[in-house]
């Protein structure tokens, strides 16, 4: 082609902006319209840019950095969409650390915008305000993608890349640092474009056919769902019917198949079915408990659907690994299976009868179950339940009916005490259209109970229940049962939680029985204002025999 006819390669338009303004414009272009943020001098220019964009961007500030990070996590879990939080460097970053760790382990798309000391001083150990040794190195252990924005022109591409990284492959958090003197620096910035639609990853059709053949031949299939199945509920439901396969969801897999479906099961029965299955289809689950505690042998064929290519073979090589997003992969699998699949006898009656037997045995947890019944009756079908590391939570994972995906949020393998209240605040903030319930023990609640101030300040109508046994009850029971009642560091001095809530201006109530809890919850959901219900309880029966159960197959 003659030189003169070459199409004019247009240079992107340049606009004069600060680094912070460019970062904010890029967040907005990517649909991020809320930042959970706690300010400080390192990020003053960033907050000024937030302020100038306040017709399009909401800033929700909390009373501790763990609050902003957990809120962003909650919003990400509730919506499946990227969310952002911002903190000062050093202590601000570390204060948000447990939540960032949890976002990583839950594969949640959370972007951390973290301040830094003056650019020229980074790495020199001069003792600048909030300096921490090798901040970038610390962050890199917490997230898969991190970068530092060093000048205004870099902001759009680095922010865009960070957001893209949160959704590519295995989703997860990302972090960006920016120095105190760089946020306000002005320069010419390339035009900020909305994100390109990501290309759908290629599906390995051979692997899909192989999986379909394997499943079509199998007689007793079990489907195991983890957090990665939450957006594949219609597909899992269809497959379960086609294969007459019970669907096991424990913590993060609950709600993928509606609990009212006779083929929906939780842990104790799920383990029994694992012992009898000739094939397992695992969808977005690490399968740590089945593979390590329940055992595996040659008679069990395994198909694993996972977005992370390294995950399926980590513990035990599956017969087939399908790599990619669960929903499109399962749709392909359904198409491939349809012509091969024999008409199967119904397993609904069998599964229901066996569920009923387990329900009898689970009566051992009757006090917890009675409170859960009251909660389920008051919480609408699409209401969101935010779990905690507490006796009621352990029982909920086993026995509370869950009707829809993303309505049962449990912290997964971190099981970090104290995540609940602030995470639930983020959930309620991101989903103002549905009621959200946060359950807590008295131990866990005071990790972030101070964020009741945030609920009031930002009018977030979250309802929290605090079960008060005056103890880190779980720890205390272990000391009683396994350490000859040698109690240590497990008793608690509590505030009056009703007065505590009232001191923030929130509604506080006490409910002493499941019936009273039911009434208090209905009232709190009707009022749509921040509320706390204190429920005094005694020691509660142990759930552990239903969770840590012995091997059912293999050596
Ligand atoms: C971050 C974190 N720290 C400590 C623990 C250990 N831990 C598990 S349960 C528990 C006690 C929970 O007490 P509470 O919230 O009152 O619930 P309860 O068992 O009394 O119902 C503790 C300390 C944990 N899981 N996570
Ligand atoms: Mg307690």
Image (spheres, helix red, strand yellow):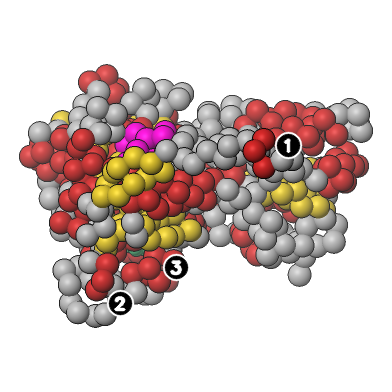
State the residue at coordinates (15%, 56%): 41
Q: Is label 1's Cβ within 8 Å of ligand 1?
A: no
- On the image, the x and y values in percent for residue 104 come to 47, 56
Label 1 CA crowd tier, 10 Å (few <14, some 14–19, many 20+): many
Position of 476 with respect to 180 (left or right) is right
Q: Is residue 123 visible?
A: yes
Disc 2 target residue = 123
State the residue at coordinates (45%, 49%): 157
Disc 3 + disc 2, Cβ < 8 Å: no
> Which SS class for mark 3?
loop
Indicate which disc, 2 or 1, sits on the residue closer to the N terminus: 2
Query: Disc 1 versus disc 3: distance between alpha carbons?
Result: 33 Å
- What's the magenta region? 23-34
Disc 3 target residue = 141
Question: Which quarter of the rendering shows the C terminus?
Answer: bottom right
- On the image, the x and y values in percent for residue 85 come to 32, 47
Counting labels gives: 3
Q: Nearer the viewer, residue 386 or 376?
A: 386
Residue 254 lies in magenta, yes or no?
no
Disc 1 target residue = 330
Task: Look at discs 2 and 1 and give the one toward the viewer.
Answer: 2
């Amino acid at each position: 082609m003659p030189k003169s006819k070459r199409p004019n390669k247009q240079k992107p338009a340049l606009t004069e902006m600060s680094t912070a303004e460019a970062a904010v414009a890029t967040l907005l272009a990517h649909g991020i319209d809320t930042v959970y943020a706690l300010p400080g001098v390192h990020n003053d220019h960033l907050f000024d840019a937030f302020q100038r964009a306040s017709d399009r961007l909401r800033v929700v500030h909390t009373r501790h950095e763990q609050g902003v990070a957990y809120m962003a996590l909650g919003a990400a879990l509730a919506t499946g969409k990227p969310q952002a939080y911002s903190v000062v460097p050093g202590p601000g970053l570390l204060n948000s650390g447990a939540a960032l760790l949890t976002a990583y382990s839950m594969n949640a798309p959370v972007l951390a915008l973290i301040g830094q000391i003056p650019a020229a001083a980074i790495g020199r150990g001069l003792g600048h305000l909030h300096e921490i040794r090798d901040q970038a190195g610390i962050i890199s252990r917490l997230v898969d993608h991190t970068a530092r924005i060093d000048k205004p022109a870099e902001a759009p591409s680095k922010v865009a890349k960070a957001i893209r990284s949160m959704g590519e492959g295995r989703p997860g958090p990302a972090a960006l640092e920016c120095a105190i003197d760089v946020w306000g620096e002005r320069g010419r910035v390339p035009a900020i474009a909305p994100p390109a639609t990501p290309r759908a990853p290629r599906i390995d059709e051979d692997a899909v056919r192989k999986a379909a053949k394997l499943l079509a031949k199998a007689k007793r299939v079990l489907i195991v769902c983890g957090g990665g199945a939450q957006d594949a509920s219609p597909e899992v439901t269809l497959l379960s019917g086609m294969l007459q396969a019970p669907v096991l969801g424990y913590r993060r897999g609950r709600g993928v198949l509606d609990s009212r479906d006779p083929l929906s099961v939780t842990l104790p029965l799920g383990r029994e079915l694992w012992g009898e299955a000739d094939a397992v289809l695992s969808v977005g689950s690490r399968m740590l408990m089945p593979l390590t505690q329940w055992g595996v042998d040659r008679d069990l064929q395994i198909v694993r659907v996972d977005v992370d290519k390294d995950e399926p073979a980590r513990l035990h090589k599956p017969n087939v690994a399908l790599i990619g997003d669960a929903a499109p992969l399962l749709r392909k699998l359904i198409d491939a299976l349809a012509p091969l699949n024999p008409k199967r006898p119904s397993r609904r009656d069998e599964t229901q009868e066996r569920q009923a037997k387990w329900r009898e045995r689970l009566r051992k947890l009757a006090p917890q179950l009675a409170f859960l019944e009251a909660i389920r009756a008051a919480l609408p079908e699409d209401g969101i339940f935010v779990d905690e590391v507490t006796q009621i939570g352990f029982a909920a994972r086993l026995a509370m009916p869950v009707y829809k995906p993303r309505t049962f949020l449990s912290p997964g393998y971190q099981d970090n005490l104290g995540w609940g209240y602030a995470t639930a605040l983020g959930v309620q903030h991101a989903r103002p259209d549905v009621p959200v319930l946060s359950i807590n023990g008295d131990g866990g609640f005071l990790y972030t109970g101070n964020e009741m101030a945030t609920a009031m300040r930002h009018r977030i109508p979250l309802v929290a229940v605090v079960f008060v046994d005056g103890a880190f009850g779980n720890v205390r029971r272990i000391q009683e049962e396994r350490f000859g009642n040698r109690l240590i560091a497990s008793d608690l001095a509590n505030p009056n939680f009703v007065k505590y809530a009232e001191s923030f201006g929130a509604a506080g109530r006490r409910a002493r029985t499941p019936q009273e809890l039911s009434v208090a919850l209905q009232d709190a959901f009707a009022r749509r204002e921040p509320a706390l219900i204190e429920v005094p309880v005694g020691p509660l029966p142990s759930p552990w025999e239903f969770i840590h159960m012995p091997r059912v197959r293999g050596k």
